[in-house]
Image (cartoon, rainbow, N blue to C red):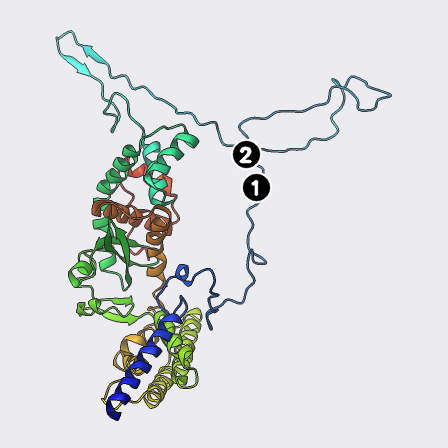
Amino acid sequence: MLAELGARVERLEAENAELRRRLGLNSTNSSKPPSSDGLGRRTPKPTGGGSGRRRGKQPGSSGSTLQLISDPDHTVVHRPDRCVNAACGADLVDAVEFGRQRRQVFELPEPRMVVTEHQVVAVLCGCGKVSEGEAPVGVTGRAQYGTGVKAAAVYGRGAQFLPFARVSRLLGDLCGAPVSIGFVHAVVAEAARRLGPFTSHLAALLHVERVLHVDETPARLGGGFKYVHVACTPGLTLFHVGGRSKADIDAGGVLPGFDGTIVRDGYAAYQHLSDAEHAWCGAHLIRDLRAVHEQDPAGQQWAEVMADTLLMAKAMTEQAVAAGREALTDAEISHIRACYAGAIAYGRQQNPPNRHGELSRAGKLAERFHTYRGMILRFVVDLAVPFTNNQAERDLRPVKLQQKISGTWRTLQGLADFAAVRSYLSTAAKHGLDALDVLKQLFTTGPWMPPAHSS
């Protein structure tokens, strides 16, 4: 009887601890997004990651004040006709100019469509043969919208994440182009089709990179979910859509056979990529350690020690890179590894197995650091590998923006089209290119192609 009561109490205490842990989760100690923290909950400020700067414009940063231009489109001269002295009132037509101020007003033009008519002329030769002129490429219908309108429609959807109906209204109100919702759907789909050569080229470039960031995020599709996967570098971004299995991860055409280093989180489905080295995102690990420590600061001091070890290693690698060094010294690496091993030993000491030989969540986390120490410390032995997977997380953020602004996707093809367009616009932005310019190029001569070694 006492044994049964003891087991029940132990079980209830474990359930109570798990409930408290879940209630304490937020964006700083788990993978939950900041939007889930709620309006009434102040998110704790992360330790070790703050910049210490005040909000707003920083001292010394460049401003964006509107500047005068040398060749305005219109110039209007405002010259007085009569002297302002009431006792004089002389005519100033021939008066000598005393000074002149330049004041410029930058204004949008009135929305008005510019219509170009192409007349294809057929001529009858003396030999009896009829020859016909050729219209420009893409001018196929009796009346159609041009590449600028198409580019603007895709821009509104793919760069500003607007719903199709709002893109339609925006083009009508601001550009004088009263396009239909169906037109916006069709143009986005056409853009995705035209991007086939671009995505193939991008997959080939990413496959030979030295370091890749990979991640995935759920996207609402109808009444369920699909996943948007990303493989990226500071210069390249490629999305594809699927489930979350190994086959879905491989479907992007980048990772099978990749033999560089993959920076990722702890999702197990990436483990089959055995040709590559793997690096575990340090930001995810810091959040896991913070979650354990916040639940029991006195009993989980090892988590703070491990977090300090990781942040120390991060600082050492960043200083080495800034100094132009290619690697840490053997002594530096040995010091980091010794601190890391000490934190694991401390974690095991503070989290022994229970009487059934089972480990607590904190104990399992300590064992994870032991099992995957090579993957977790990859950034220490290879300075080309960053501490975090922030690159992938930043590149995936537009998926959440799209959902927040426009809601769910209705079809899998629509989600796939969004992924293709975002791949194009994100990569172009990383090369400093204007989104509308590359979209116009897409609808005229074909997609812009990133050069090799663009990361």
Marks 1 and 2, how far apart at CA:
9 Å
Quarter of the C terminus within the rendering: bottom left
Q: Which residue shows up at 32% across the image and 52% down it?
A: 399
What is the quadrant of residue 266 in the picture?
A: bottom left
Q: Is residue 450 visible?
A: no
Q: Position of residue 206 (x, y in %)?
A: 25, 57
Along the horizontal axis of the image, is 154 left or right of 175?
A: left
Of the image marks 1 and 2, the number of the one nearer the N terminus: 1
Q: Residue furthest top?
A: 126
Q: Is residue 307 above or below residue 137?
A: below
Along the horizontal axis of the image, is 174 left or right of 347?
A: right
Which numbered dot is residue 423? none
**Residue type for callout 2:** Phe
Q: Is residue 249 above or below residue 357?
A: above
Q: Position of residue 273 (x, y in %)?
A: 18, 67
Residue that mark 2 sits on: 106
Seen from the viewer's position, the closer of residues 76 and 302 is 302
What is the quadrant of residue 125 in the picture?
A: top left
What is the quadrant of residue 75 in the picture?
A: top right
Q: Position of residue 267 (x, y in %)?
A: 25, 68
**Residue type for callout 1:** Leu
Callout 1: 10 Å neighbours few (<14), some, many (20+)? few
Could you say whether the residue bearing mark 2 is in a helix, strand or loop?
loop
Q: Which residue shows up at 55% across the image and 56% down it?
A: 56
Callout 2: 10 Å neighbours few (<14), some, many (20+)? few
Residue that mark 1 sits on: 66
> Mark 1 touching mark 2, by CB under 8 A?
yes
Could you say whether the residue bearing mark 1 is in a helix, strand or loop?
loop
